[in-house]
Image: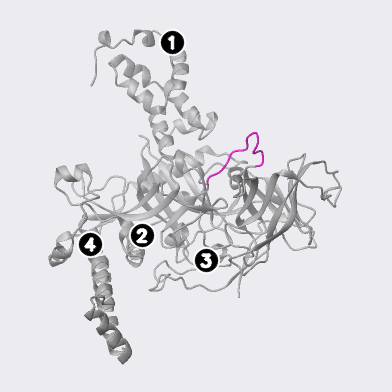
Amino acid sequence: MVFDDKTCGSKMLLALPDDIFAVVTRSLTPKDVFNLSVCCRSLYVLASSDKVWLTQCELLGVIPHKDLIEWRKGVNSYKSLCRFLVSVQPIIGIWVHQNPELGNVVYVMPGFISVVGCRIIPQELGPLGIEEGPILWSPVFEIIGDVDGSSAFLLHGRERDNNYMYPGSIKGVDRNCNVLLLEVEPRLQKDGGKLLHSKSFVGNPNHVDKELSRKICPSERRVSKSQRFNGKKPCVPFSRLAFSDRRKLIETVTSQIRVKVAQPADGLSFPCLETDDMKRLSERRARVIQMYKHDPTQSDLAEIRKFLDNSQLSRDIYRMQSSKKKSFVGYFRDSFKQIIGKSSSNRTSSGENNKYAQFQEFLRSGDTIGLTLHASTARLSSYRAWPNMHDSRFALYKLPKQEPLTGQEHAGLWGGTFGWPPGRPSADKAGKALFFLLLSYDVSQDGRRVLIGTKILEGTHYVLHPNGSAMFIVDINEPSVEPFPWECDGESNVLDLKEAFSGEGIANGYGFRYPGSKPGSLFVFEDGMLVFMWKESRAVLTLQRVNLQDLLKKGERIPPLPPISNFSYLTKSYSNVYAGFSNQTSSARGFFNEDGVEETTGVVATRNSCSGIRIGRM
């Protein structure tokens, strides 16, 4: 409701100069500023000024002031820019998955009026070291802001030696999201058969067998208020579909909406430290938005219906073959269970029919289907700062990153290698595997305050330790008396030891999944370097704090995987699948077998001059 100026009581605010009013609004959130603007007409004009919303953009802290000035050139106003920044701010950060075990690290960082999900490739350290050498990465997805601040989702992928983009939409972004879900969502057509800000393919719900409607009994517990008022039945959530159905839906949708990326649109995604070419970034963004807003690719649901028919036929054949192969004992056991009312066959058949009915209901809830990105909040347990993950979700999981503060000075992301001296490998020795560790503080079960170094990436040829392993755990209240064996680093600089702590480092235990630990010490030097040394073996892991955004800006881009695996690699693997499949020509179709287990060949990653990766096959 809009009130008259005389009854608004806003004369004091209106009398303030624009600069002072912008300072006053620094204590307000973007939502507060918007609510203030609807109080009266005069406040609407005042609260809609670019100065006010520039202040709000600065307070968000997503990008520096100089970049805000450049980004403003591509949107209608700072208010539109703030709308986009608010929507993508929770997604920025480090996202991981358990598979492959070498590491699956996706860093979401600002691009140009966009955020870009970049996967760090497991690699060896090049001769230029961590800070100077180009790090290998591949694109996973982008979220691009339009002129009005709305968002467009683009998944990256590679099929048959061609790079593609797979346009979709943002389903929702929770403020405290910790899971990124790649999903498919049914929609209704709008505006005479055209979908705005989405790519989809269209089907006729009347084609679906109407007799199945009698078998579907949706739960009313999840009915929203709008659905109750409109008399609509709730849609089956994508997460409730069977894994094979979810996989096939995403495969089919991506095959229909994919857009081959021309060279200009496949270029720079974010400014580099050396060039910082805003003109090229602006031109690329314009081409991508034009490609995204192109008429939606439309097709019927024949491919999905064919898949449904084949799946049902396969189930029927499997049941017939299973019944013929039953032994007398198995037949007697099932007959006995039927007598006492515990028939496993009936229960299995009922469960399969229910999943099949849910799939049909999911397709009937709209006449279009599109790709979506859902940033949601889930209750996740964790062990030593590593989240416990679902093995059947096309998802990425956000790592909670502690900021370095008083009392937790070493929290954050660190990179390093095994061996001494630290840094660059010598010319006569093979490259060192690059490790990324997330350091965080926690309280142990016996009440001790500890520092945990969690492995999130390792650049070895074949994984040594499970993803998410604690490479070391040290008690920050227990000083170490162990002497450091070297006085100088590799460049003959004298080392100035600041402090040392006692702890334990990872070691061989009861198999790969259950590593043990052995005593060691963490040495902290005045120049910021950390070194963990195992007491018995004298092996050392040297670490330095890294800034992923700066590393990626001078990194080297390599092609991505096929779209589904590029977002979430669900198969257990112990080698560098990202470097291996970046040169593979196979499509995503046929990438999985019927049981959802990926069929891959062995991949070996070896050193290559500056970048650190060369591919060979075992």
Tell me: 21 left or right of 481: left
Residue 149 visible from this viewpoint? yes
Q: Earlier in the sequence, mark 4 or mark 1?
A: 1
Q: Amino acid at mark 3?
A: Phe
Labelled pair 4, 1 in contact (Cβ < 8 Å): no
- Most distant residue in the bottom direction: 328
Tell which circle, 2 or 1, labels the residue nearer the N-terminal end: 1
Which disc is residue 137 wearing?
A: none
Which stretch did the figure color magenta? 400-410
Q: Which residue is mark 2?
A: 254
Q: Which residue is mark 3?
A: 581
Residue contact at pointers 2 and 4, CB within 8 angstroms: no
Give the amino acid type for the residue marked by disc 2 in the picture: Thr
Considering only order in the chain, which callout, 1 or 3, is on the residue closer to the N terminus? Answer: 1
Q: In the rendered image, which residue does mark 4 sit on?
A: 300
Which of disc 4 and disc 2 is earlier in sequence? 2
Mark 1 lies on residue: 17
| Place of residue 595 in the rendered image (x, y in percent of width and height, measured from the top left) | 39, 73
Circle 2/circle 3 CB separation < 8 Å: no
Per the model, the C-alpha gap separating discs 3 and 4 is: 31 Å
Mark 1: which secondary structure?
loop
Q: Classify 10 Å Cα crowding around label 4: few (below 14), some (14-19), many (20 and above).
A: some
Q: Please, what is the three-letter code of the amino acid marked with disc 4?
A: Asp
Q: Position of residue 428 (x, y in %)?
A: 80, 62
Amino acid on which the number 1 mark rests in the picture: Pro
Lower sequence index among marks 3 and 4: 4
Q: Secondary structure at mark 3?
A: helix
Specify few, some or many for label 3: CA neighbours under 10 Å numbering under 14, 14-19, or 20 or more. many
Q: Residue at point 76% right, 52% down? A: 422
